[in-house]
Image (cartoon, coloured by chain):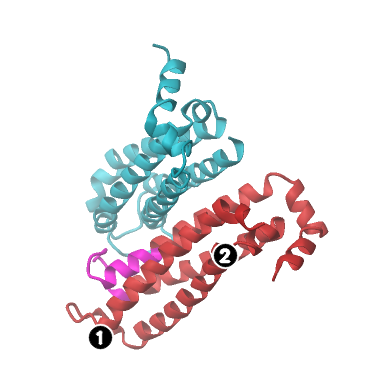
Amino acid sequence: MFRSFADWLATTRLSLLFQNQLWIVPTSQSIHIVCVCLVFSSAIMINLRLLGIGVKGRSISQLSASLVPWMWGGLCVLLLTGTVQTIAEPVRQFVTPAFWAKMGMILIVMGMTVVFARKVRANAARWDAAGSRPPSARAFAIASSILWVLIVVCGRFIGYTWAFYV
Amino acid sequence: MNLDTFLTWIEDLPLSSAIRGASAGTEWLFPIIETLHVLTLAVVFGSIVMVDLRLVGLTGRGTSVSRLTDETLPWTWTAWVISAITGTLMFMSKAVTYYGNFQFRMKFVFMALAALNMLIFHFGAYRRVGLWDTAVPPTSARIAGALSIGFWVAVIFFGRWIGFTT
């Protein structure tokens, strides 16, 4: 479906620039990985806290307030570097199911996180009270963690599976 | 037995050739091992950076450094061990190539620097953490935090570049 668009994108000056300057894709990917670390660790740290097995030094609302901004910042840079990488190698991304699965899951987990962060802000006292973990919190923590792991897996597997679909 | 012979011997092990995907049905071993490597390195870097940012004074001001360290270090170490195991498995598959690779060597140079930095901090400023636990850390601690971030970003960059140079 997107193949003709991808083929065209690969012929644009920007794409050719990214393809010919060999340092651009590896550098973009490295920055991408640094941000994956920040976003993934923040998400897992919050989720483990919600499940009662994470860092206990701060309350959930405090932990969330301190980590969520880093997640958003990280996601912005991930989008930027991801765009660079896609412009450089459009076909690689667009023909691969893992890429689309990853994008879909990112949207889902972002939506979930927005809803969750809003709930935590609105009910900070209730969430922070020890021992009264709402079941929705556990569900969110488990679902979110699975999604983040799958997102990282799909990200890696774009590289490993794209050749099958070209 | 010299180093070259030893590395070749490692490469010739059945496990190594399986990871290389030499025989049918083993092609997905390396991708799976590498993906696990990425997931655990995300936790390593994320947890380390969390402490480093606190040491530098950019985040969590007024919160206890020792408590943060106590809570994150088990995760850092556990994740690092799994990263090391998966890394070793990947190394084994092409031991000769990786050992001779400049980026691979630099990755370990910077990891050693990170370790050295961590030791100096741990036996230096951290020994008197009781004096500055919730305050602005002493200058040497702030420097250690900043260097740590720098060293680990370099580890990630060189790590990613191995894939582009081998």
Quadrant housing the N terminus of chain B: top left
How packed mark 2 is, by other alpha carbons closer than 10 Å (few <14, some 14-19, many 20 or more), is some
Decide whether residue A59 is among the magenta residues.
Answer: yes
Quadrant in the picture for residue B30: top left
Percent across and percent down for residue A60 are 30, 74
Q: Which mark's residue is nearer the viewer, 2 or 1?
A: 2
Judging from the image, mark 1 belongs to the subunit labelled A
- Residue A140 visible in the displayed image: yes
The residue labelled by disc 1 is A126
Where is mark 2, residue-wise? A97
Range of residues picked out in magenta:
A42-62
Residue sitting farthest toward the left = A131
Residue placed farthest to the bottom in the image?
A122
Provide the secondary structure element on which disc 2 rests. helix
Q: Which chain is cyan?
A: B
Q: Position of residue A14 (x, y in %)?
A: 78, 58
Is residue B113 visible from the viewing direction of this image? no
Foreground of the two, B29 or B137? B29
Could you say whether the residue bearing mark 1 is in a helix, strand or loop?
helix
**Which amino acid type is marked by label 2?**
Pro
The mark nearer the N terminus, 2 or 1, is 2
B96 to B106, vertically: above or below: above
